[in-house]
Image: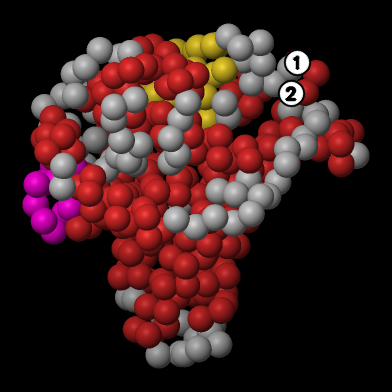
Amino acid sequence: MLNLCQYLIFIILLLALRANRLKLSALFHISPFDLFKKMRLNLLIANGAFHTLIKTPIFLRLLLLQKQMELIGGQAVVEGVMMISPSKVAIAVRKPNGGIKTKAEKRLSIFQSVKKVYFLRGIFALIEMLHLGTKALIWSSNESMEKEEQISSTGMALTMVISFIIGIGLFVALPLWVTGFFTRQQFLFNLIEGIFRVLIFLAYLLLISQMKDVKRLFEYHGAEHMAVHCHEAKKKLEINNVRRFSTLHPRCGTAFIFLVLIVSILVFSFIWSERWITRFSLRLLLIPVVAGISYELLRLSAKHQDNIFFRSLIKPGLWFQMITTKEPDRKQIEVAIAALQKAI
């Protein structure tokens, strides 16, 4: 649920940061983006592009190189990129005046103490990434705005609470409730619920991808992947080098989300109750279990990317990235490079 909640935080931050034109400035102290443009679905083109990419020698070489070097993670933030190495966390943001503001700090990871404990390490990694990602979103949202537009601490706290409530409602409560109208047979119930959850996730991504500023977020997401690819290929971090690489990356959090959606179907199949509130509560309690199993599958996929089974396992996550990543411009790539250089 990591990226889901952070996308929600991002969207609510956007609405809050533009709220004064909607006469809500007394709560958030800020100013609105244009929300939606026409829906434009390119799934067939995306599918063909993926199959072309996955067969190219450079893509396969990149998969092998990932095993031989220090892994870098990251995510897009408001008008910028966060990069995470084993020792540092760095953020770079494009300021309103056109300059780039960077911030780097030592990575104090609770994950290090449990990194060899199977399943448990996945839960701690999820907590750490949620903490770092949310902090980065909040910092970048303020740095990318003029001082008088910055969101208050009250607004930030409210944004996070609302985001988590909406996330639980959309991706746990809603599919659970809707499935109750179709069947009460345990296996079928969990299967249909899982399918609904995937469909809701897909619809959610397609919907938010039409927002002007989410499109910019997805462009920075593409820039982040391209810069990481360039680093992993041991090329000099220059704009022209970075532009040669794909916006898709097999270790992206979007692939992790897909694994969570699939693993949840299997895990939730082992629990059952006739009472809706009990089923809902058990699903919340089992989220850490689902996250731990999904994390181990993602690690196995990273180690065995030349194996057809594991390549197939991450393939849907790459398809989803056709929505969550877009081709960045030179200035966005420059920001991604600045973040990565600070992190390594």
The quadrant of the rendering that contains the C terminus is: top left
Residue 199 at x, y = what percent? 47, 67
Give me the C-alpha separation between circle 1 and circle 2.
6 Å
Query: In the picture provided, is 278 more to the left or to the right than 227?
Result: right
SS at badge 1? helix
Q: Residue at x 37, y 55 (%)?
A: 45
Asked if the magenta segment contains residue 307, the reply would be: yes
Disc 1 target residue: 147
SS at badge 2? loop
Please, is residue 38 above or below residue 219 in the view? below
Q: Residue at x 42, y 79 (%)?
A: 192
Query: In the picture provided, is 221 more to the left or to the right than 303?
Result: right
Q: Residue at x 90, y 39 (%)?
A: 23
Tell me if label 1 and label 2 are in contact, CB under 8 Å. Answer: yes
Instruction: Give the colour scheme of this rendering.
Output: secondary structure
Asked if the magenta segment contains residue 48, the reply would be: no
Disc 2 target residue: 150
Please, is residue 125 above or below residue 270 in the view? above
Q: Is residue 237 visible?
A: yes
Q: Which residues are magenta?
A: 302-311
Residue 261 at x, y = what percent? 38, 62
Question: As rendered, which of 51 and 134 lies closer to the eye?
Answer: 51
- Quarter of the view holding residue 126: top left
The amino acid beneath tag 2 is Gln
Density class for disc 1 (Cα within 10 Å; few <14, some 14-19, many ≥20) is: few
Query: In the picture provided, is 174 more to the left or to the right than 183?
Result: right
